């Protein structure tokens, strides 16, 4: 039986993005995918709170004797786990979320997180 030559398949070239296009990035906020919560909301809250900057600090927040909200999720300084370390910050956010839900984040209650959905 003679060998059958496979048909040649033409694959179209992918559509290139314009040179000025920059894909949005989650940065360290992508750590939200390590936890069992609504990751779409978690990512949006993280980006709205810190812009994805793990070194974000808000010195205008005063919490029972300490000053500042810290890191990706802007964790209040009074919480154990308030840290600039991205993994610790997101882990703390997950723990706080499980205890109190989304309403403890100003980006959620103000609705500013919605622009990242």
Image: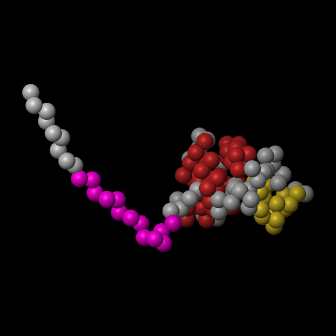
In the rendering, at what x and y percent does residue 64 appear?
87, 56
For the question of whether residue 88 can be seen, the reply is: yes
Q: Nearer the viewer, residue 114 or 91?
A: 91
Q: Which of 52 and 108 is in front in this view?
A: 52
Kindly give the residue lying farthest to the left in the view shown: 1
Taking the spot 84% from the left edge, 58% from the top edge, the residue there is 63
Taking the spot 88% from the left edge, 57% from the top edge, the residue there is 66
**Figure label count:** 0
For the question of whether residue 99 can be seen, the reply is: no
Dominant secondary structure of the magenta stretch?
A: loop
Q: Which of 107 and 2 is in front in this view?
A: 2
Relative placement, left or right, of 69 versus 9 is right
Kindly give the residue lying farthest to the top in the view shown: 1
Q: Is residue 42 magenta?
A: no
Relative placement, left or right, of 42 versus 93 is left
In the rendering, at what x and y percent does residue 92 appear?
73, 45
Kindly give the residue lying farthest to the front in the view shown: 2
Q: Where is residue 77, by image quadrant?
A: bottom right
Location of the N terminus by quadrant is top left
Relative placement, left or right, of 60 versus 72 is right
The figure's colour scheme reads secondary structure
Taking the spot 60% from the left edge, 42% from the top edge, the residue there is 34
In the rendering, at what x and y percent does residue 100 appear?
70, 47
In the rendering, at what x and y percent does residue 98 appear?
67, 42
Part of the protein shown in magenta = 10-22
Relative placement, left or right, of 16 versus 88 is left
Is residue 90 shown above or below 22? above
């Amino acid at each position: 039986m003679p060998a059958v030559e496979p048909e040649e398949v033409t694959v179209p070239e992918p559509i290139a993005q314009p040179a000025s296009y920059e894909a949005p990035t989650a940065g360290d906020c992508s750590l939200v995918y390590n936890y069992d919560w609504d990751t779409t909301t978690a990512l949006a809250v993280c980006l709205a709170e810190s812009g994805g900057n793990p070194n974000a600090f808000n010195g205008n927040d005063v919490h029972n004797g300490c000053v500042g909200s810290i890191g990706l999720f802007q964790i209040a300084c009074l919480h154990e786990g308030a840290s600039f370390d991205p993994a610790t910050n997101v882990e703390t956010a997950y723990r706080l979320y499980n205890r109190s839900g989304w309403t403890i984040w100003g980006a959620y209650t103000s609705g500013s997180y919605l622009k990242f959905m």
